[in-house]
Image (cartoon, rainbow, N blue to C red):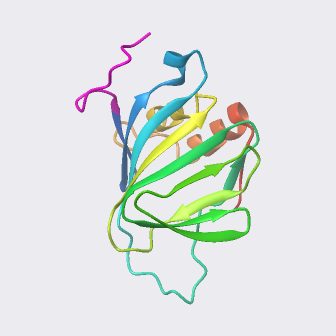
C-alpha cells in the first residue's frame, strides 16, 4: 500500500490525447474502495453553438463518479440535462447514469475525478496515449465494457 500522503511530484501522470491527468490514489491502495485523479480537459477548437456538442456520453453500471471543477467552465451531461459547471462546482454521477462532458470554453478545465469503487483509473494508465507503441484505438472502450459494465454511445 502506498503512503497516505501524495505530494505534488507523486502520482502517475498520463496523456489522454490532448488531455492530461495524474492518478493520485489507485483503487489498489484503498482496498478497492475508491480512486482519485486530476484531469485537465484541453481547450477545444471553437465550436458552433448551434451544433449539438459531442459529450462522449456513456454510463458505468457499477461505478459512481464525482467531478469537482477546480478551474474553468465545463458543459456536463447528466442524464438528459446539460449543466454548465464552473470552478467549485461538484457533480455526483450515480452508477448507471448517462453522463459526459465537453469543454466549449476555449480554455483548459481542471478537474478532480473520483471513482467509487476504484479500479477504473487503471484504464487511463494502461491506454495512455503517451506510450510507444500507442495503444489500440478502441482498447480503452473495450476494456471498460468488459471489466466495468460501461456502455458508450456512438
Please state which of residues 39 and 129 is positioned toward the viewer in this rendering. Answer: 39
Query: Residue 1 location in percent, x, y?
Result: 44, 9
Asked if the stretch drawn in magenta spans residue 8, the answer is: yes
Q: Residue at x 52, y 50 (%)?
A: 67
Position above or below: 9 against 39: above
Position above or below: 55 against 52: above
Q: Residue at x 36, y 61 (%)?
A: 42
Q: Quadrant of residue 108?
A: bottom left
Task: Describe residue 10's horizontal placement relative to residue 120 as left or right.
Answer: left
Query: Residue 105 location in percent, x, y?
Result: 39, 74
Position above or below: 82 against 93: below
Query: Does the magenta stretch mainly form a helix, a strand or a loop?
Result: loop
> Residues in magenta?
1-12
Which quarter of the image is occupied by the C terminus? Answer: bottom right
Count of labels in the image: 0
Asked if the stretch drawn in magenta spans residue 105, the answer is: no
Query: Residue 119 location in percent, x, y?
Result: 58, 28
Please, which residue is most extreme toward the bottom here? 50
Query: Residue 61 location in percent, x, y?
Result: 76, 41
Amino acid at each position: 500500500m502506498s503512503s497516505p500522503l501524495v505530494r505534488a511530484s507523486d502520482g502517475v501522470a498520463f496523456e489522454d490525447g490532448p488531455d492530461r491527468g495524474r492518478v493520485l490514489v489507485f483503487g489498489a491502495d484503498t482496498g478497492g474502495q475508491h480512486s482519485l485523479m486530476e484531469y485537465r480537459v484541453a481547450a477545444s477548437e471553437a465550436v458552433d453553438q448551434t451544433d449539438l456538442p459531442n459529450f462522449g456520453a456513456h454510463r458505468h453500471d457499477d461505478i459512481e463518479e464525482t467531478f469537482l471543477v477546480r478551474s474553468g467552465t465545463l458543459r456536463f451531461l447528466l442524464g438528459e440535462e446539460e449543466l454548465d459547471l464552473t470552478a467549485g462546482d461538484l457533480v455526483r454521477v450515480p452508477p448507471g447514469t448517462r453522463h459526459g462532458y465537453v469543454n466549449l470554453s476555449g480554455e483548459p478545465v481542471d478537474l478532480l475525478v473520483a471513482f467509487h469503487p476504484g479500479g477504473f483509473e487503471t484504464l487511463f494508465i494502461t491506454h495512455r496515449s503517451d506510450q510507444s507503441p500507442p495503444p489500440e484505438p478502441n482498447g480503452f472502450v473495450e476494456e471498460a465494457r468488459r471489466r466495468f459494465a460501461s456502455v458508450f454511445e456512438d
